[in-house]
Amino acid sequence: MTHQQQLLEQFAAELDRRRRLEKRLRLLDAIHNTGSLTAAAKLLGVSYKTAWNHIREMNQRCGSAVLDTQAGGTQGGGSQLTATGKALFSLLRIQRNGSQQRLADKVPALRFSARNQLPARITSIDTSGVIAKVGLAIGQLQMQCHITSSSIERLQLTVGAGVYAIIKASTIELSADNKALTGSNSNCMPARVSRCTSSSHGRELELTLGDGLSLALARPFDIHEDEWIYQGAPVYALIEPEEIMLATSA
C-alpha cells in the first residue's frame, strides 16, 4: 500500500470515529454536483468559512489538494474535485458502508437493510490506484466493486475466489433506459420488476436479473414513475461500485 493510500484510509477511518464522516461526505458531494464551494456551502446551510476550513483540513490530512479552484473572471470561477478529492470521496462512501455493515452484524434486527447478498466470483483485482477495483462475476453478470486496498489484504482476496457481494436496498437506483449512463462508472444491469409494493411512504421492489438472481430495493415514492415502474416492467438497475461491500465465508 502506498503512503498516499495509507493517509487517505487513515483519515477516512478517523472521520468515522469522530462522527464527522457524513458531513465531509455531503460537502464533497455538494461540490461535485454544483461545481462551486460557495454554492455547496449555501446548499448545506453552512458558512463559506466553515466549508473552507473543512477543505483545508482535508488538504492537510490527505497530503495534497482535494479541490481545484479557478478564480472568477469572464468565464466565471468554480471548484472541482481533484484526483485526491475523488479518491477521498470514494473512500468515505466505502468507509460509511463498512461501518453500517459492522453495526448490522452486531444488531441482527438491522440486517434487513443489507439483505442483498449475492454469491460472486472475483475476476480481476486492480490495486494500482488509491481505490482497489475488483471485478466480479455474479452469474452471467459482470460488475465492478471499489473497496480499500487494505481490505484486499484483510480479506485475502484473490482472482478466482468466491465472495458475497452485499448491496443495501436503499443504494440501488433505477432507470427506464441506459441512455443517461454515458461516462458513468455505475454498474448497469437489465432487469425486470417481479414485485412492486407502493405507498405514500415509498416503494419496495424486487428485481429479477436472470440466472435466478434477484435484488430487493427501496426508493421514495414518486407518482410520475408509475408509468415505467410497475410489476413486469423492464428496467435498469444502477449500482455505484462504492456501494458494494464484499464478504467472505471464512
Image: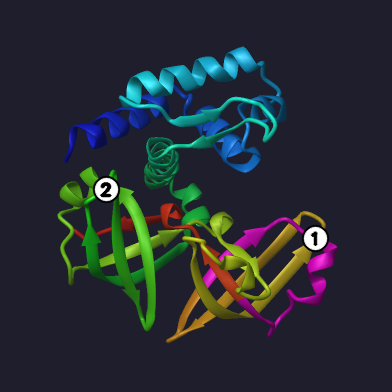
Assign a secondary structure to mark 1: loop
Q: Provide the residue designation for mark 2.
A: 129
Q: Is residue 165 above or below residue 83?
A: below
- Asked if residue 241 lies left or right of residue 124, the reply is right
Q: Observer-nearest residue: 105 or 13?
A: 13
Q: Nearer the viewer, mark 1 or mark 2?
A: 2
Marks 1 and 2 close (CB-CB < 8 Å):
no
Q: Earlier in the sequence, mark 1 or mark 2?
A: 2
- Magenta-colored stretch includes residue 217: yes
The residue under the point 65% across, 77% down is 195
Give the crowd class for mark 2: few <14, some 14-19, many >=20 residues within 10 Å. Answer: few
Q: Is residue 99 above or below residue 55?
A: below
- Magenta-colored stretch includes residue 46: no
Residue 87 picture quarter: top left
Q: Position of residue 121 (x, y in %)?
A: 26, 72
Assign a secondary structure to mark 2: loop
Bounds of the magenta span?
215-235
> For residue 222, which numbered disc appears in the image?
1
Residue 233 picture quarter: bottom right
Which quadrant is the N terminus positioned in? top left
Amino acid marked by disc 1: Asp
Q: Position of residue 38 (x, y in %)?
A: 66, 25
Amino acid marked by disc 2: Gly
Q: Position of residue 31 (x, y in %)?
A: 59, 35
- Asked if residue 111 lies left or right of residue 133, the reply is right
Q: Position of residue 127 (x, y in %)?
A: 22, 52
